[in-house]
Image (tube, rainbow, N blue to C red):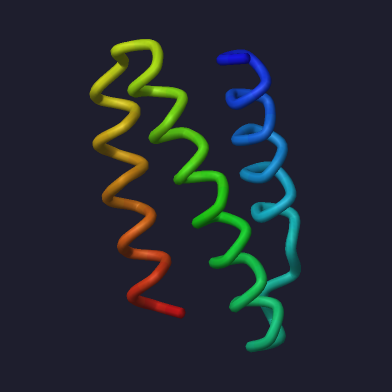
Amino acid sequence: MVEIIGMIATISLIISMMVNTKNPKTVIMMRALNAVACVAFVVYGLLLSAYSTAISNGFIFFVDIWYL
């Protein structure tokens, strides 16, 4: 189950980084996808006791939300 969460996080992050950000609407989509990836990475990091992963992605999540 932990690996599935990690794979969801990784795939979401990869997709969000492939979004063309020249259009303001796609920037919103990129931020939203990245926020989903961050939440998954926070859960993943906590399940593995990888607190640096959880903390850094928690911070990035709030940055994504701020700019949405």
Q: Position of residue 64 (x, y in %)?
A: 42, 65
In the rendered image, which quarter contains the N terminus? Answer: top right
**Is residue 35 placed above or below 40 in the rendered structure?**
below
Please give the name of the residue rendered at 61% of the width and 76% of the height, measured from the top-left corner. 27
Number of numbered discs: 0
Q: Is residue 2 left or right of residue 26?
A: left
Toward the front, the furthest residue is 1
**Is residue 18 placed above or below 48 in the rendered structure?**
below
Q: Nearer the viewer, residue 65 or 47?
A: 47
Please give the name of the residue rendered at 68% of the width and 25% of the height, measured from the top-left corner. 7
Q: Nearer the viewer, residue 40 or 12?
A: 40
Q: Quadrant of residue 25?
A: bottom right
Q: Is residue 60 left or right of residue 13?
A: left
Please give the name of the residue rendered at 67% of the width and 33% of the height, measured from the top-left corner. 8
Q: Position of residue 32 (x, y in %)?
A: 57, 66
Q: Quadrant of residue 16?
A: bottom right
Please give the name of the residue rendered at 71% of the width and 86% of the height, measured from the top-left corner. 23
Toward the bottom, the furthest residue is 24
Q: Position of residue 26 (x, y in %)?
A: 70, 78
Q: Position of residue 68 (x, y in %)?
A: 46, 79
